[in-house]
Image: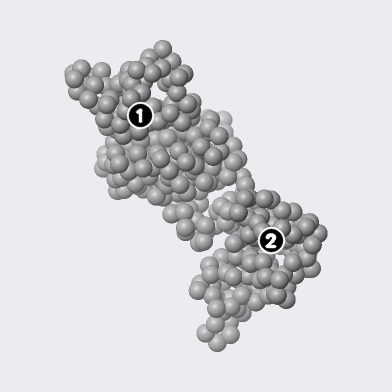
Amino acid sequence: MFLEISKLGVHYAGSPKPAVDNVSFSLQAGEIGVLIGPSGCGKTTLLRAVAGLERAQTGCITLAKNLVSSPKVHIAPELRRIGMVFQDYALFPHLDVARNVGFGLAHLPAAQRSQRIEEVLALVGLPDAGKRLPHALSGGQQQRVALARALAPSPRLLLLDEPFSNLDVDLRERLAHEVRGILKAAGATALFVTHDQLEAFAIGDRIGVMHQGQLHQWDDAYALYHRPATRFVADFIGHGVFAQAHIEQRGDTMVVHTALGDLTDLQECPLPGAYAGGLCDVLLRADDIVHDDNAPVKAQILRKAFRGSEFLYTLRLATGETLMAHVPSHHDHALGEWIGIRAEVDHVVTFPRKTLAAPTKVDVSAQYRS
């Protein structure tokens, strides 16, 4: 592995809990990793520890097979050959783009420096911007210049801390795809911090979900969505609810009884013995719920959010349980209307039942949480 973090702990003086608590994950050369989680979860502290800006109280960080952080070893940031891209770009306003990009190349002869500046500006799609000042560029172009400056010295690892947070929502996802292409073209290994799920999905090969200093899961986007390792990951990623369920084994088949009806013909399902009496909570994503006027189960529309090609409906069953569903936008039903729904669940995700609590609504339009 190119970057390996093992049981890392970072504890700030005066804080009752570690900012980073026993975190382990790794990146192969050329991979892009993303850390995501709510504000204060420890993701930026972890990034700063990799950069050498925070010391490790426990565990270790290895970069290119070299130990750079542990309780006894701390290689200075400037000796780690790590590039950083910040959310405020940190461009020098009085220097043109070429001199901003070449700022870390003073050790090279002038001809080599100029050639490298041209290479990285072409890589980020700004080959003719060298003589322009930062204020004459758009936010997206400034971010590309910051990326070019970080890539220019050929760092072993690139760290990006919320690099798109100052941009509008539509530009964020598009730029995330573009930056991924740039990093892949450069063969760069990168670790990226964001609070935006769409950014994380667009740019990351591996995504880590953090909460209260701990890493709950380190996986690809598909696994995080369909096979969340913890209830927090299930709650944080995507739209859905936890509904009470009962797992029963019928011969070789598992049946999950829910207020929406029985879920059968399941590709994946835990054994009933995994939970006392087979009682559990099942995760029902918005895309697990299908609008079907002929379905026997009816639900009342409590809320609806227009998303262009679809609505996100919040629905209530006659039992009082709440569900969410993605419905094509030409199915424009009124609030309070009852519609037929059925479940199509390929990935059954269950957790121990939460007692003495109403069904938990999972509403992470918090992909825009700060």
In the image, what residue type sits under mark 1?
Leu
User: Going 55% across and 57% down the picture, which residue do you hit?
Assistant: 230
Residue at label 1?
A: 126
Could you tell me how far apart the alpha carbons at marks 2 and 1 are, in whole angstroms?
Answer: 44 Å
| Rendered location of residue 111, percent (x, y) | 19, 20
Q: Earlier in the sequence, mark 2 or mark 1?
A: 1
| Callout 2: SS | loop
Residue at far top of view: 94
| Rendered location of residue 104, percent (x, y) | 30, 22
| Rendered location of residue 256, percent (x, y) | 62, 75
Residue closest to the eye, 299 or 266:
299
User: Going 52% across and 85% down the picture, which residue do you hit?
Assistant: 252
Residue at far right of view: 336
| Mark number displayed over residue 40 | none
Image: 349 above or below 9: below
**Crowding at label 1, few (<14), some or many (≥20) Cα neighbours within 10 Å?**
some
Image: 128 above or below 157: above
